[in-house]
Amino acid sequence: MENLVDIIRRMPKAELHLHIEGTFEPELMFKIAQRNHIQLKYGSVDELRKAYQFNNLQDFLDIYYEGARVLQTEEDFYDLTWAYLERAHTDGVLHTEIFFDPQTHEANGVQFKTVISGIHAALRDGYEKLGITSCLIMSFLRHLDESAAITLLNEALPYREMITAVGLDSSERGNPPEKFERVFSMAREYGFLTVAHAGEEGSAENITNTVELLKVARIDHGNSCLDDKKLVNLLVERQIPLTLCPLSNLKLKVVGQLEDHPLSKMLQLGLMVTVNSDDPAYFGGYVNENYIAIAKALNLDRNQIYKIARNSFEASFLPLSIRKKYISLLDDQFIK
């Protein structure tokens, strides 16, 4: 039988939990910083890589925001996005749904139009040159006030056709979903789909409130859902997808070791789980590395890997016809 690692590497898949700012590799960061005459706090690529030895979400976010400040022009956002798309293509990604954080860049004096124009141009080229379909998800930073999120939502309206959904990321602790109930309601009225990070460093109650108050189509992370049997039943009944990120969870100590990751139990319970890379430049692995690491740690079999990959398409925001096309391609690979 074919090696499972080889199957993972060649099989078609979608990636649904990917922060474009989190794909900023040190080499590209230094290149763009030099182009924009920006001095980084780190003297070399090696020094920057050593700084990635953080121990919690906030320490990661501090480095993340330091990197984001060098992104200033459409060209910068294009180059960042294109570098990810090329890597995703080599990993067999046929479809990607990308988070971007306009508020982070606006704090650095970069206009919304600059950010989205550069990213969108790369996504367009990604489809034309690599055949990768994509969706954009605009994230609200949850450590900011809801009024700031409403301001951002209004800024985004002229670019409505470029944005499929809105999301919620940044520090979960102290920033519960109910803080953003009004802006999510407004977003749905404008026709945006909704997703939100929950249950990464927060409780199962955070996930429940995210589902019920923000009416999300997907939960990003969702690790702590197993703490509440009623919530698990709800997620299974509604087949609300969870976009799990194993190597991110390991790096941020959401799990002590990958062997403790809840993914296997989630599959057994009938939860719709997917595997994604989150912020791969910072967490040490793109989507294939995440699949391979979790498959080895949990001793997943061929059928479980197939189910996770199929879920990635089923949980996407693609039209049904394209989802079926991609699943057919996946089926062809597993029949061989």
Image (cartoon, rainbow, N blue to C red):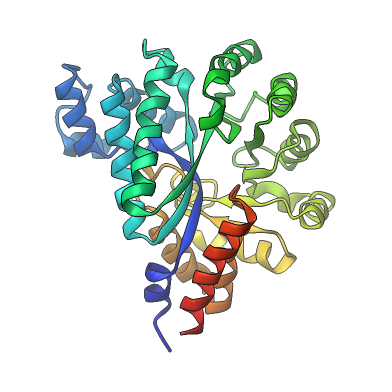
For the residue pair 176 and 111, the one nearer the viewer reads as: 111
* Quadrant housing the C terminus: bottom left
Say which quadrant the N terminus sits in: bottom left
The residue sitting at the bottom extreme is 1
Where on the picture, by quarter, is residue 26?
top left
Which residue is painted at 50% across and 79% down in the image?
Answer: 334
Query: Along the horizontal axis of the image, is 24 left or right of 226?
Result: left
Could you say where residue 275 lies in the image, as x and y percent from the top left?
A: 52, 56
97 shown above or below 162: below
User: Is residue 53 visible in the rendered structure shown here?
Assistant: no
Location of residue 308 in the rendering, given as x and y in whole percent from the top left corner? 57, 64
Q: Residue furthest right?
A: 230
Nearest the eye: 19 or 138: 138
Q: Position of residue 209 (x, y in %)?
A: 77, 34
Q: Is residue 211 above or below residue 129?
A: above
Q: Which residue sits at x=39%, y=23%?
A: 115
Total number of numbered discs in the rendering? 0
